[in-house]
Image: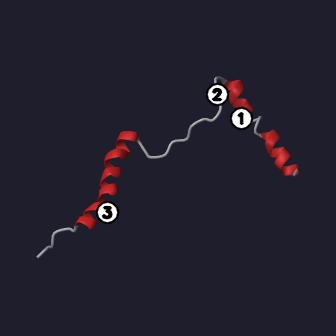
Amino acid sequence: MRSRMSTDEESARLPGKLAMIMHPHYRGKIEVTLKAPVRDFYDFSIWYTPGVAEPSKAIQKD
């Protein structure tokens, strides 16, 4: 004979059920966003190669 699930157990399972509903809607749960605008390849080069090299060199010297 199976006993009825307690309210605590049911409450504990609710976040998992809701996550399964929301996950496909949002296509994941975490997102990475930009802090600075990247309008073109020049802006991109400031934040990534070759632009990333200068802060890295300064860290290496320190």
C-alpha distance separating marks 3 and 2: 43 Å
Label 2 neighbourhood size at 10 Å, few (<14), some (14-19), many (20+)? few
Q: Looking at this rendering, what residue extends furthest in the front direction?
A: 7
Q: Which mark is residue 38?
A: 2
The residue that mark 1 highlights is 47
Label 1 neighbourhood size at 10 Å, few (<14), some (14-19), many (20+)? few
Lower position in the chain sequence, tag 3 or tag 2: 3
Lower position in the chain sequence, tag 3 or tag 1: 3
* Closest to the observer, 51 or 36: 36
- Element assignment for label 2: loop
Question: Label 3 sits on what residue type?
Answer: Ala
Mark 2 vs 1: CB contact within 8 A:
yes
C-alpha distance separating marks 3 and 1: 43 Å
Scheme by which the image is coloured: secondary structure
Q: Which mark is residue 1?
A: none
Residue 19 is situated, as x and y percent measured from the top left of the image, at: 35, 51
Q: Is residue 46 left or right of residue 7?
A: right
Image vertical order of residue 9 relative to residue 42, above or below: below
Image vertical order of residue 35 relative to residue 57, above or below: above
Q: Is residue 62 left or right of residue 51?
A: right
C-alpha distance separating marks 2 and 1: 9 Å
Question: Label 2 sits on what residue type?
Answer: Val
Q: Which mark is residue 12?
A: 3
Mark 3 vs 1: CB contact within 8 A:
no
Image vertical order of residue 22 relative to residue 4, above or below: above
